Amino acid sequence: MFKLANNLSKEDALKKLSQETFTRRTLSFYRYVRISDPQVFRDQLYAEWMQLGVLGRIYVSQEGINAQINVPEPQWEAFVQNLESHRELASIPLKIAVEESQYVESFYKLTIKLKKQIVADGLAHDAYDIENVGTHLNAEEFNKLAESEDAIIVDMRNAYESEIGHFEGALCPDVDTFKDELPAVRDALEDKKDKKLLLYCTGGIRCEKASAYLKNEGFKDVNQLYGGIINYAHEVKQKGLESKFKGKNFVFDERRAERITPDVLSQCHQCGAASDEHVNCANEMCNLLFIQCAACAETFSRCCSEKCKTVAELPLEERLRLRKSGQTKPKMFFRKKRSEVATS
């Protein structure tokens, strides 16, 4: 019987990965579906996927499942058959990664967590009807409508995601969480409820809730990119279309991003040079996610500031003492303005 939790340290997990002789396929999928007993469903998936060597981060709730994983190529067919064996997952659309990194695996351990929601929205229960969503558009339809003067393209991702890549002319709210973005978009477009809205996100899951919410708020023509940026990139390549999405697509795994086009849209948060490389501050007590160019990575020893560089260079015992004292707290995924990063 497999343990229903993976307690390997990151170091041990990465060592185990380095010894593998096969490749892995990174993918994501989601589905809003009624799950009567999330705990039982979670435990069953964990036992089955552990046997198949699946790694990744999965959220399960009564409203459905949201998964970002990688699967050993030799187990791919068995994994697909496993999905089909579950009523909740049968025929679920799979979004295969646009690119795999040759330097780092997307995930190094299997984690399946129970959540109240698979996408936290901070809304009241009656704020939307998840079955009344916007019109789904493929890449060709999205491109065509994006050229209309009556259309408004809306990025339903966080600012640190849209900063490194977005659709041309898109409204990109300056927020760090999805629950903040919903009211921000509503307020920004309050006088444009008759306009054609074109929503997009990474893989489609946030647009399902966002489109339902905006329709409930009185927006009359709400549309969304089917399968998100991931599916769009595949369609553009397969059909020879122009990519109106420029730059990188941020992803929530060890790769951090997939390059969609060569365009570099963002700047180093420390010196302002062109860069779209997200890193986490090497001071583990900070762990701030920010954009850093190669020159600043060398100058600051991969830290976000001189202060963090000083802490990161302390002996391990001193760093542990500081951590226990509670003087600093991790700031993963919350941005600072470039000037704040450079001077903090």
Image (tube, rainbow, N blue to C red):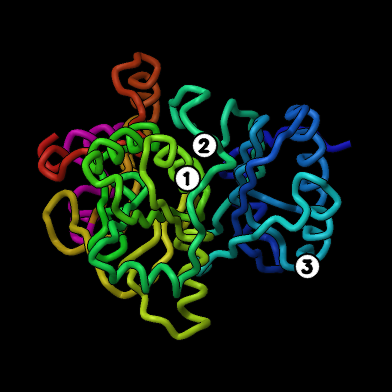
> Are the residues flagged by discs 2 and 1 in contact, CB closer than 8 Å?
yes
Magenta residues (range): 293-315
The quarter holding residue 5 reads top right
- The x, y position of residue 115, in whole percent, is 60, 28
Residue 49: x and y, percent? 77, 48
| Whether residue 287 can be seen here | no
Considering depth in this image, is 1 or 78 the residue closer to the camera? 78
Q: Residue at x 20, y 48 (%)?
A: 300
Farthest top residue in view: 325
Answer whether residue 340 is magenta in the image. no
User: How many dots with numbers?
Assistant: 3
Callout 3 touching callout 1 (CB < 8 Å): no
Give the residue at mark 3: 74
Quarter of the rendering occupied by the C terminus: top left
Assign a secondary structure to mark 3: helix
Give the amino acid type for the residue marked by disc 2 in the picture.
Val
* Residue 46 location, quadrant: top right
Quadrant housing residue 283: top left
3 vs 1, front mark: 1
On residue 206, which mark appears? 1
Q: Residues within 10 Å of mark 1 (few under 14, many from 20)?
A: many
Is residue 123 at all visible to an observer of this figure?
A: yes
Amino acid marked by disc 1: Arg
Q: Position of residue 257 (x, y in %)?
A: 41, 59
Q: Circles 2 and 3: CB distance less than 8 Å?
A: no
Q: Indicate whether 44 appears above or below 205.
A: above
Badge 1 element: helix
Amino acid at circle 3: Pro
Name the residue tied to disc 2. Answer: 119
Residue 175 in the image: above or below residue 52: above
Residue at point 62%, 48% (across, down): 30
Name the residue at 36% across, 29% down. Answer: 330
